[in-house]
Image (cartoon, grey):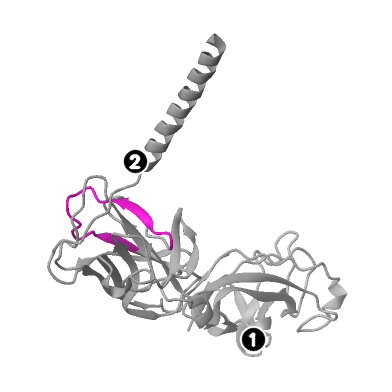
Amino acid sequence: MTNLKNKMNKLLFLIFILSLSTLSFYSHAAPDCVNNGGIKHGTMDARGGTIELKGMIKKNQEVARFTFKRDGSDVAVADCPDGAEFYAYATYSEASGVMPTYYMDIDGRPAYYVVRNGHITGLDDYAYVLIENESGLSFRSQPGQEVPVNSPKLNTRDATVIVYSTKDNPKSQRFTTQYIGSILINRFNSGGGTTAVGFSYRLSVNIISAPTSCSAENTNLEMNLPKMPITAFSSIGFPRDNQYAEDNLRINCTGNASAKIKLMAHNTTSYDGQKTIIKPDNEGDSNNAKGVGFVVSSPSSGDTVLINNQFVPLADLTSGSNSVPLKAEYYRYGDDIKPGKLNATANFVLEFN
């Protein structure tokens, strides 16, 4: 009989624990806010005006951020008991039925294209992150982000929208009252429509792409020509079996551009009536050569020879990174020549149109 009582006590103990667990689970659900019979929906607008981008814009770079102003008076849309939550959706409608097109997470927050299916329609230069200011939580697609109300009434909830470029040097784009998010007191249901209780968030901004600009990523070029016998320089001009050396300018542009280049050397002489021959440093001294210099040209513009203190065509450039070669060749300019070392330095100035 004693053994039977012990078994029954153990059974009752297990049932008691399960009952406590069940009660704990159901008590965790947050209570709902309830519309108080007044206004059901408020509209929040971020009016960014015109934003003119400048310089080089990189992929995932922040280009603008705005807060919102309510369209109308600050009237509560719901009464909320202690512990109530609302749901913050990224969406392209007043409710939450039009799911946004996900781009990627940026800084740990979900980002969505400002325009639905932007990557398909070609309107994919910009994405947004929407943040509820009081909690610091991000709006997200279904399921919405749970946010505590922390107030007896659901009044205007401010938010911040951050606009990002989804590519290097994005195009101009205008957004006019573009829906980007909503707050609802209940989770989305297909019958909610525009009568859903809460707030919707709209973005208006005109983003103007940065004017085309270019910059050289490297500023020191070095061209080492191979050795040549003095017999190759039998007359004024380029030597027989002329050798050359190349190095490349790396130029980054925000759009298509035309580049020109100007040679700036302190010691030059003429070739074809133009100051195009760079004379060597310390010509004829000690072990230095004499009577032979260098001509630099641009292969990308039909081997146009660079002229001292005068701009000549360099290359047509496209958006992004461009590799532009410069070519150096020997040229005999002196009646008397002497073998030896040849070294010369020169500066170049670039111009972009």
- Image quadrant assignment for residue 175: bottom left
Q: Amino acid at mark 2?
A: Ser
Residue 297 location, x and y as percent?
66, 80
Q: Which residue is denoted by mark 2 in the rendering? A: 27
Mark 1 vs 2, N-terminal side: 2
Q: Which of these two is toward me, 105 or 33?
A: 33
Residue in the picture at 80% in, 84% down = 235
Quadrant showing the N terminus: top right
- Circle nearer the viewer, 1 or 2: 2
Instruction: Determine whether the residue tagged by mark 1 lies in a helix, strand or loop.
Output: helix
User: In the visual, does 191 lie left or right of 285?
Assistant: left
Q: Is residue 311 magenta?
A: no
Q: Is residue 143 magenta?
A: yes
Instruction: Determine whether the residue tagged by mark 2 lies in a helix, strand or loop.
Output: helix
Q: Amino acid at mark 1?
A: Ser
Between the residue at mark 1 and the residue at mark 2, the CA separation in whole angstroms equals 77 Å
Residue 215 location, x and y as percent?
50, 70
Residue 301 location, x and y as percent?
64, 86
The answer to whether residue 8 is above or below residue 294 is: above
Q: Which residue is denoted by mark 1 in the rendering? A: 301
Label of residue 328 in the image: none
Q: Residue 294: tell me if it is visible.
A: no
Residue in the picture at 39% in, 80% down = 173
User: Please, what is the dominant secondary structure of the magenta stretch?
Assistant: loop
Task: Give the residues in magenta.
Answer: 142-161
